[in-house]
Image: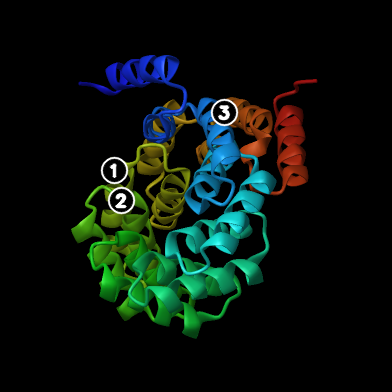
Amino acid sequence: MNDIERFENLQTTLKLDPKNFQARRELIMLCLDLGLESAALSHIKYLLKVFPNDADLYFNTGICWEKLKNFDNALLAYQKAVDLKPNEPDFLYNLALVYEIKGEIDKAMDNFKKVIFYKNEDANAFFSIGILYAKKNDHIRAIKCFKKAIEYNYSDYYAHFWLASEYKKNKEFDFALVEYSKVIELSPDYSWAYYNIAQIYWELGRVEESVKMLKKTIEKNPKDAEAYKLLTQIFIKQTKKDDALELLTRAAKKLENGDIYYLMSKIFELNEDYSSQRDCLELALEYKNSLTFNIDSVKHEFKAVNTKLNVK
């Protein structure tokens, strides 16, 4: 029996016997699986009239409101669940997540730590605390937490990635490269790991290795604008204008990005193709929301090339 058939059967059961509480609980969970949060809430409301102190019902209420992006109501529901059952790690974890979403970092941290108090090998809680420490730029504690997360769940490539990123921030490149390599072992298509390896190689002057990793990044994610930009920068430094232009032309077909068009304009300027330079500058300004170069400078260049071409 598939989910839709189960849903219809449970609906029929409740029409015949509205007080079949077990069927209603099953229907609530099925509604959550099917993305029917509003329907789940109506059934939870019914049950709460009968079971006003049921912590699980408040927890499921929190899940509904969280999925509906109503984080204030989600917070109230999760807090009620925790009040009724204060030593339940899942309740504390979801409460902490909502605090984090609302930007209340200290309260999120406190509740994640309570999760570990009751379940001291919870890899997800250690990982979440690590992220909060990373946001606070507390590298030592962040690294310690990510290591704990990996100790309890080695296959979590996100934990390896965040650990690598902390090492990278601290210029501990050897350790960072080891962890990024583990990310790739666990998730070969995770393009951002290749890109970060490329950045490290570039900073270390290992140019050809950087180029190899950037090409791998683009292979895995053909819309990675940052990879195109760094590879273009390398090609320009290597005076490989044709390679740079070919790369940017390929990038422009994949994504509409102001920086890509601006970099193309610089290649055309070097080639003294001012008409194409002008066209690319115009496109860079058209997609200014993705333009990280100084917009006033770009406008000045656009005006200058128009003057050169006698365009009003």
Give the answer, above or below, for where 76 lies relative to 39: below
What numbered label is drawn on residue 220?
A: 1
The answer to the question of whether label 2 and label 3 lie on touching residues, with beta carbons closer than 8 A, is no
Q: Distance between the residues labelled 2 and 3?
A: 40 Å
Q: Which residue is drawn at 64% across and 47% down?
A: 292
Q: Which amino acid, mark 3?
A: Ser
- Rendering coords of residue 267 (x, y %): 50, 40
Query: Badge 2: few (under 14), some or many (20 or more) residues near its Cα, within 10 Å?
Result: some
Q: How far apart are marks 3 and 1 (CA)?
A: 44 Å
Q: Which residue is drawn at 67% across and 28% down?
A: 286
Q: Which amino acid, mark 2?
A: Tyr
Residue at which label 3 appears: 42
Query: Badge 3: few (under 14), some or many (20 or more) residues near its Cα, within 10 Å?
Result: few
- Rendering coords of residue 295 (x, y %): 73, 43
| Quadrant of the image containing the C terminus | top right
- Rendering coords of residue 304 (x, y %): 75, 36
Q: Residue at x 51, y 69 (%)?
A: 112
- Rendering coords of residue 98 (x, y %): 59, 54
Q: Residue at x 35, y 37 (%)?
A: 222
Q: Which amino acid, mark 1?
A: Lys
Q: Which of marks 2 and 3 is nearer the N terminus?
A: 3
Q: Earlier in the sequence, mark 1 or mark 2?
A: 2
| Nearest to the observer: residue 82 or residue 201 | 82
Residue at which label 2 appears: 190
